[in-house]
Amino acid sequence: MALEPSDVMRAAHLARLAMNDVDAAGYVDDLGRILAMVDQLQEVDTHGVAPLAHPLDSTQRLRADEVTERDQRDHFQRVAPAVENGLYLVPRVVE
Amino acid sequence: MMQWETVIGLEVHVQLATKSKIFSGASTAFGAEPNSQACAVDLGLPGVLPVLNEQAVAMAVKFGLGINAEIPEVSVFDRKNYFYPDLPKGYQTSQMYHPIVGAGDVEISLDDGATKRIRVHHAHLEEDAGKSLHEDFHGMTGIDLNRAGTPLLEIVSEPDMRSAKEAAAYLKAIHAIVTYLGISDGNMAEGSMRCDVNVSVRPKGQEAFGTRAEVKNVNSFRFVERAIAFEVERQIELLEDGGTVVQETRLYDPEADETRSMRTKEEANDYRYFPCPDLLPVVLDRAYVDHLRSTLPELPAEKRARFEGELGLSAYDASVLASSRATAEYFEVVKDACGDAKHAANWVMGELSGALNRENLAIEQSPVAAEQLGGLVARVLDDTINGKAAKQVFQALWNGEGDSADAIIDAKGLKQVTDSGAIEAMIDQVIADSPVQVAQYRDAEPDKRGKMIGYFVGQVMKASRGTANPQQVNALLKEKLDQA
Amino acid sequence: MHDQTLTQLARALADGEVSSRELTQTLLGRIERLDGRLNSFISITQEQALAAADAADALRAKGQAGPLTGLPLALKDIFCTNGVKTSCGSKMLDNFIAPYDACVVEKLKAAGTVSLGKTNMDEFAMGSSNENSHYGPVKNPWDLDAVPGGSSGGSAAAVAAGLVPAAMGTDTGGSIRQPAAFCGITGLKPTYGRVSRYGIIAYASSLDQAGPMARTAEDCALLLGAIAGHDLRDSTSVARGVPDYRAELGESLSGLKIGLPREYFGDGLAPEVEQAVREAIKVYESLGASIHEVSLPHTHYAIPAYYVIAPAEASSNLSRFDGVRFGHRCDAPSDLIDLYKRSRDEGFGSEVKRRILIGTHTLSEGFFDAYYTQAQKVRRLIRQDFLDAFEEVDVLMGPASPTPAFDLGANKDPVSMYLQDIYTIAVNLAGIPGISVPAGFVGSRPVGLQILGPHFAESQLLNVAHQFQQATDWHQRRPALAEESA
């Protein structure tokens, strides 16, 4: 599947990565070759094969509904770029 | 003039009443200091991992059983990827392809007492997002992640509703089911239940659906009706003017009572769902599901049927009383205390409900306890008090003037006088004091006398301070007046 | 002292020949003197290390020392370490002081080990050469012109240079085994789920697994016993008892069936590497093992499948680095989108962005089934290849990498770099354990023999590796740099 610059720009936007046209051209080249390598997957006959999401066939363990965490806000917010009154700050979100 | 039909489907998000979050051990309590209940997992700190809450699973399954849904053996969590400041990990853990609850249905009751089945497509578990606070922080938005990770059950209906009233009735039915099951507090003001509405219109008789708009932020029973009414009118006007409905997301503004396009720069969302590699498939064995089934309480539809069938209530009364768990439980206590379902129903839906409405109270907040009301109704039924005195007793109970109907009856001397000697004496006195009225009565044609007797009854009741048995007074009066 | 194994040092500590403080000071001194040339550490935690060493010595004085008490080691900078910068090799986390300990770190602390610091790595564990680090490349102690391998290149180089006797790594597609091979040390990737991933900054969650890197299989056994086990905080961690891995190191290899996957000895394998591996296999024959050729028919598709699955998971895992709650935030963002896009553009290096873009693209509408679903199906076939092979043989052997360590800067093209992982990557897709042991040299550069076993066969794998190390001395060779006294 050929990769277009618009595919790269679209992926960059979805992934929230700044990307100008010059960057995009470089990525079209790199990603195009990676995808060409990946395209070999299409050769494999996977008819009737179920997808495998986890290497072990285990099932989800459930946790008891108990409050085990205490308030560590100040500790966690020490690594935050911008906080005020306990809130994380971001540029104004327009709804 | 074209006839239009409205087609409505609802997505209801119900916050499950777990103590801790769906994937972490942080508290879900409402109203805490910002970010004080956002633990490392809720914040999406590097390296943290989710572990699924057993109660969230149990509650979802109970809901599924409550709507007669199939419970698939395996369900899977997926990641829904998008960036938003209240979504800490950049993805929401949800269930896209293998939800925990399959297809089921919900019975709704309409104003005329009729019922209708609304199909539920599926219900899935997911995590709630945090909240953005838009007060002014130097032109910034503040993010509180306390709500992030609260378990949500998203209940997706089929487009089976045909009016705003049906949609509201469906929402009420879901509310009743989740509160009956005790899996949510159903508090819409605190956001425990939130609703998105898909609305379209089509010419009556047309099979194909019209283009729908999704209306978000419809968070009360009243707003559901109003938002749909507005949206239907908007779409019909648009179509009748030769326009077309655009498939879009709209926001309901309760203050302006209108829906507005969310004009999100119309970038097509691409959520890139894929199975969450940090969570394994959830496998529910039969025994577990059967065990949960055995714990289910009687649900609204069953209750309604029992109230109508076994207790002999009208369809309307049965559906009103069964509509909320609190009302139903209140009614049943009154009924058991007084031994008469119809009288109990009349009192709960009449005197009590009127008083609650006047004071804007929920039944859980009623100053008159169900046992007290039952005691009162019992005294009416055994003729201890008459109807007038009963209203006095109710008011006294409401005002907290006594612990029980009996205590108030005693204290106020409201016990009905049924001693015919005493009543006779009062009647004789009234007849003696009203010679003019007695003469008029006796001169009147027998068919006019019925009306005229009211005066004497009133006088006797007054003399008894309301405690005389009105039927007895009536009969004795008739006897004495007609004698001469 | 610095060239001893963990096991030897444990004995020296127990016998009172040396204190943990002395050992720690000696090694901190070596790091100070030698690491300028290697760049194997991102952070050196001298203060915490000395405090931990003193605590260990105090514990020993009270007679409460365990088998690992006082032993120094290092942690790949992917393990969250409370109060210590945990950068994951990225500018994105250059300012990130982790507010909690990873499960592995907790366990190692509880066992009384002394961490000397955080080792260099490819950014977010994406790379096979350690050239993708924000903190610069790591040099191979055997040859400063060569890469140490990646992504756990700092851990491998530090152990090889005698800066620490052991270090923790993580392996998503070969990131323990390949650098272990390139640096001439022993590195074990355990079965997926054997070691908790809690607190390990995720690259590809269904593939990531932590493991020990040390001088010998015996040391790896000692460390695995300390870090393995069920962790309630990791849903993918397996509830299964942890055997005493060292207790099982004495088993004879007589009757052991070794499978040689045909596909691991084909085109692209450097002849000198093949020769070293074949020599090693002869050693096993002399120890009583039998050799069988087997086939892993879908080997060729492991790299394509990996480069769909790993970037897909990574693109989602790395979305949390958005400049809001931690990590790099751009200056004066004009709006929310600008905050996201510039913070992420500035914080991530080019290989990380490449994989995020690949993952985002392959998960997109219209591509998902052809790429992701197909890759997951191929993943099942790849796992089945291994399950089938282990019906026939006990372990599989082959090279850890098709070449010895290559020159710094030699692999500019991402695809040719990816192809370096041909022998290691399928193992992660299948979730089985693998170990790389030193098995010779090509010139000055070490060659690694890779040994693979069925799920949870770590005991057997470690014994098979240990028996080889009883019969050979490749693992005792030290680079000249390590012996410099200056």
Image (spheres, coloured by chain):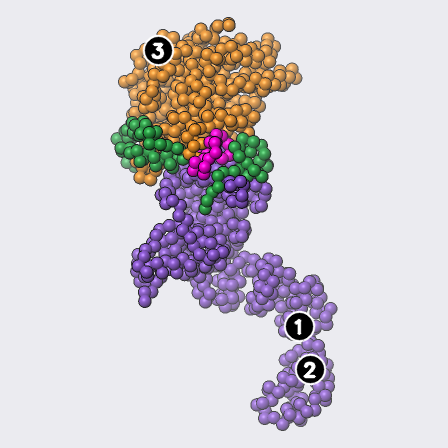
Tell me where residue C18 appears, x and y as whole percent.
59, 10
Q: Chain of mark 1?
A: B
Shade of chain A as shown in the rendered figure: green
Whichever of callouts 2 and 1 sits on the residue coming sooner in the sequence is 1
Q: Residue B265: x and y, percent? A: 38, 44
Pointer 3 indicates a residue of which chain? C
Q: Tell me the tag on residue C276.
A: 3
Tag nearer the camera, 1 or 3:
1
Residue C370 in the image: above or below residue B251: above
Magenta region, residue range: C316-339
Residue B422 in percent (x, y) is at: 73, 81
Residue named by callout 1: B389
Q: Which chain is purple?
A: B
Mark 3 vs mark 2, foreground winner is: 2
Q: Chain of mark 2?
A: B
Marks 2 and 1, how far apart in space? 15 Å
Q: Colour of chain C?
A: orange
